[in-house]
Every structure is written in C-alpha cells, then in structure tokens.
Image (spheres, helix red, strand yellow):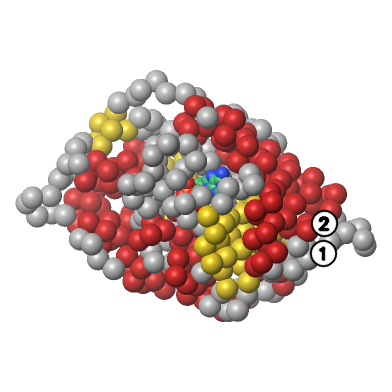
C-alpha cells in the first residue's frame, strides 16, 4: 500500500496543464484544481465544439456555466497543431500534464474515423512530444478508457495487463493512444536509462462517467435530461448492454491522485483501471430505471414531466454488450475505493439538473458537490 497520503492540498501552487479542459471531465477537473489553488492552463477546442458538428455556436456547455475561465489560462487550440501546442507548453512550463482532449463518442467515430484517429492518436503523439521537449514536466497522465481492451464479452473484469484492441474506431484509437504512450515511455522516459528524461508516465482507463453538466450527444444521462426538458419519454437504444458507471468526480479524483503520487515517487507510474464496484456495473436499462425513480422522487409535484422510458433499438453500429473493469490494482496501490455509489451519483445529477433548469449558481453547486465528495 502507498505511503503517499494524497490530499488536494498537494496541488496548491502547482503548475498543471490539462488538454480537453473545456469538456465535461475537464471542467470538473478545472473546478477542483482551481479550488485547491493550482495554476491551471488548459488547451482544447472552444467549449461546445466537438470538432465534428459544423455549427456549435448555440450549444450549451458546462465550461461556460462553471465559471472557470477567469481563474485559469484557457487556450483554444487544436491538439493536432503541434507548433501551437508547444508554444503553450513553453509559456506555461507545467510540472504536471493531464491529457484528456479526445473525440470520445463511439457513434461519431463510426461516421468520422479519420478525425477520431487524428485527434486521439496523433493528438497523443503531439502531447507526448511536448512533454519530451519541456523539461519542467515531471508527471504525465494519459486518460484513455475501459474500451481499450479486446472485448471478449467476459463476465469478469479486464485487468491492466490484458490485450489492448478496441473494436470500433473510438475504442481502437484509444488502444493506439496507449501504445503510443508505451513507446514514448520506453524510448524517451525509460527510468532504467540514465540519459532519458526523468518524467513519470501513466495511463488511466476509466469506466462510463455520469454527472451533472454533460451535454454530449449520444450518452445516456444527457439523453434522459434532454427528454425531460422536451417533456418526452426517454428513448433507450441498448437497454441490455452492461457498463461500469461511475460519478464524474471518481475518475477525476483518481487522475489527480495518480498524477500527484508519481510526481512524489516515480514508482507509482503505470497503467490503472479506474472503475466502480461490481454493484455499479449496470445494464443501461437499470441505469435509466434509477434515473426515473430519482427524478420522479424529486419532481413529485404536478406540472413536471414524469420520467418513463421505452426500448427503441435503432440497429446502430456494433457496441460492446458487456464491459467490466478489475480495479484491484489502484485499490491495492493507493487504498482507494469509490466514494459514491450509483444511487448517490444519480441524486447529485438530479440536484445539478434542478439548479440548471432554475438558472441557479452552477459554480457554487459544483463546489458544494466537490466538497461533499472529498
Ligand atoms: N465521459 C466518459 O464516459 C468517458 C469514459 C472513459 C474515458 N473518457 C475519456 O475522458 C476524456 C474526457 O472525456 P469527456 O467526457 O470530458 O469528453 P468531452 O467531449 O466532454 O470533452 C472532450 C474535450 O476534448 C477536446 N477536444 C476534442 N477534440 C479536440 C481537438 N482536435 N483538439 C483539441 N481539443 C479537442 C474538447 O474541446 C473537449 O475539451 C476523453 O479522453 C475520453 O475519451 C470519457
């Protein structure tokens, strides 16, 4: 077990560069880091721009709602632009880099495979090249996904040493991103090679994330909330597929834990699965059932849309049927365990959505949820 006692105080005054800071996880991470007193630089596309849809001007996004922009250096840029990215590294001189910028939607990867690979694979190459060229960086974490493994539809969880070979272009591009990281580690950051750069390198493979403020297309909780907004029944396409669902702050906390631990001691560098306990590996149908029950408990007055759902399979492209992670390694290494189960996560989503619908103070609510979580 680790002798590194993690607290967010570690980040006070630390220079941290995050790619993908305008996204769902990125915004929650910025809010956490700013609260801890870190000096944060972000590099990503403009909030609401997924790099694919031509018009994103009117799109709602968490980054704007969370009021983080004024407390950090937010740079709008494309991860495929190495020159620009290097300029930002040169300026920021980060000590810690967390790479989250990606095209993260499976269905979009079927319609835009080239963009997905360019962003997720060459984007990773570019970030690692900047890490290599920037001596201030001591800790780098690449955020991939549970989908990096060759999915054998097993009923047990994948371990970190299992074969990487995602099926669809998104999953596979993230497997490639893992391989790119491994090659840079061996070639340029090898701890056994005296001449190589001293920088700890890790990858983190998280499960499906749910939480307030996700406005992405084609994700189940945002779909539920959009249906409530439109006062419609929720449409579920794959109610029988099982996924490891976790509250957004779980992986965000773990990424920061890993980045801090390996900054403290390089022996903590490696690949880590980051997922929920088995009881939170649910079918999508059960997850939506839970959403409906929490929603109907909260909004039990007249005038609100009662949450119900129906199964409408649209014969979409292949997606894995069963996916679970074995998270023994991160638990054994750091004594970490998930903070909240899915039941509590869903209550927090309804709380967040209520604040959003009523035009409340989103930043204050996020800080409150972060405080409760930690
Ligand atoms: N949300 C999940 O359930 C989940 C699960 C496992 C892993 N992940 C991974 O976590 C990371 C963050 O996911 P998220 O849910 O916050 O996604 P998101 O779509 O909300 O955010 C993606 C971020 O990447 C940036 N980005 C996309 N293309 C870019 C480009 N070409 N150049 C620069 N920036 C670009 C976007 O601007 C945005 O800031 C991703 O790497 C994703 O693969 C997400």
- Image quadrant assignment for residue 49: top left
Percent x, y of residue 256 = 59, 65
Judge left or right: residue 322 versus residue 48: right
SS at mark 2 in the image:
loop
Disc 1 target residue: 198
Q: Is residue 159 above or below residue 38?
A: above
Indicate if the residue with disc 2 has its beta carbon within 8 Å of ligand 1.
no
Taking depth in this image into account, of 80 and 366 the one nearest to the observer is 80
Percent x, y of residue 336 = 57, 64
Indicate if the residue with disc 1 has its beta carbon within 8 Å of ligand 1.
no
> Which of the labelled discs sits on residue 45, or is there none?
none
Seen from this angle, which residue lies furthest top? Answer: 315
Q: Give whichever of discs 1 and 2 has the lower sequence position.
A: 2
Judge left or right: residue 61 versus residue 298: right
Q: Are marks 1 and 2 in contact (CB under 8 Å)?
A: yes
Cα gap from disc 1 to disc 2, whole angstroms: 6 Å
Graded by Cα atoms within 10 Å as few (under 14), some (14 to 19) or many (20 or more), the crowding at tag 2 reads many
> Which of the labelled discs sits on residue 189, or is there none?
2
The structure residue drawn at horizontal position 25% and vertical position 66%, both measured from the top left corner, is: 360
Taking depth in this image into account, of 373 and 92 the one nearest to the observer is 92
Percent x, y of residue 312 = 30, 26
The structure residue drawn at horizontal position 32% and vertical position 41%, both measured from the top left corner, is: 223
Q: Is residue 169 above or below residue 44?
A: above
Taking depth in this image into account, of 258 and 28 the one nearest to the observer is 28
SS at mark 1 in the image:
loop
């Amino acid at each position: 077990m680790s002798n590194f006692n993690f607290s967010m105080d570690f980040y006070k005054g630390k220079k941290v560069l995050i790619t993908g800071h305008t996204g769902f996880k990125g915004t929650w991470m910025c809010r956490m880091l700013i609260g801890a007193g870190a000096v944060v630089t972000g590099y990503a596309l403009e909030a609401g721009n997924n790099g694919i849809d031509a018009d994103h001007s009117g799109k709602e996004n968490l980054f704007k709602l969370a009021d983080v922009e004024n407390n950090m250096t937010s740079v709008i840029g494309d991860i495929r632009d190495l020159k620009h990215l290097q300029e930002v590294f040169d300026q920021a001189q980060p000590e810690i880099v967390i790479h989250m910028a990606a095209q993260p939607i499976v269905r979009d990867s079927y319609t835009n495979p080239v963009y997905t690979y360019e962003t997720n694979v060459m984007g990773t190459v570019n970030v690692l090249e900047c890490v290599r060229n920037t001596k201030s960086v001591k800790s780098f974490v690449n955020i991939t996904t549970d989908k990096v493994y060759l999915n054998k539809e097993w009923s047990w969880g994948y371990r970190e040493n299992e074969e990487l070979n995602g099926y669809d272009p998104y999953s596979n591009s993230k497997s490639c991103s893992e391989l790119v990281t491994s090659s840079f580690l061996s070639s340029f950051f090898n701890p056994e090679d005296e001449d190589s750069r001293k920088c700890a390198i890790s990858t983190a493979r998280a499960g499906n994330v749910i939480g307030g403020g996700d406005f992405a297309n084609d994700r189940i909780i945002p779909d539920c909330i959009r249906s409530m907004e439109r006062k419609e029944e929720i449409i579920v396409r794959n109610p029988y597929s099982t996924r490891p669902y976790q509250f957004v702050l779980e992986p965000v906390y773990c990424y920061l834990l890993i980045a801090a631990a390996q900054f403290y001691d390089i022996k903590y560098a490696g690949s880590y699965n980051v997922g929920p306990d088995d009881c939170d590996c649910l079918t999508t149908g059960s997850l939506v059932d839970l959403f409906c029950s929490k929603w109907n408990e909260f909004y039990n007055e007249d005038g609100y849309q009662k949450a119900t759902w129906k199964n409408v399979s649209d014969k979409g492209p292949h997606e894995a049927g069963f996916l679970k992670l074995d998270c023994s390694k991160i638990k054994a290494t750091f004594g970490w365990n998930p903070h909240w189960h899915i039941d509590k996560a869903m209550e927090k989503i309804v709380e967040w959505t209520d604040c959003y619908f009523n035009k409340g103070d989103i930043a204050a609510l996020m800080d409150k949820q972060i405080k409760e979580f930690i």
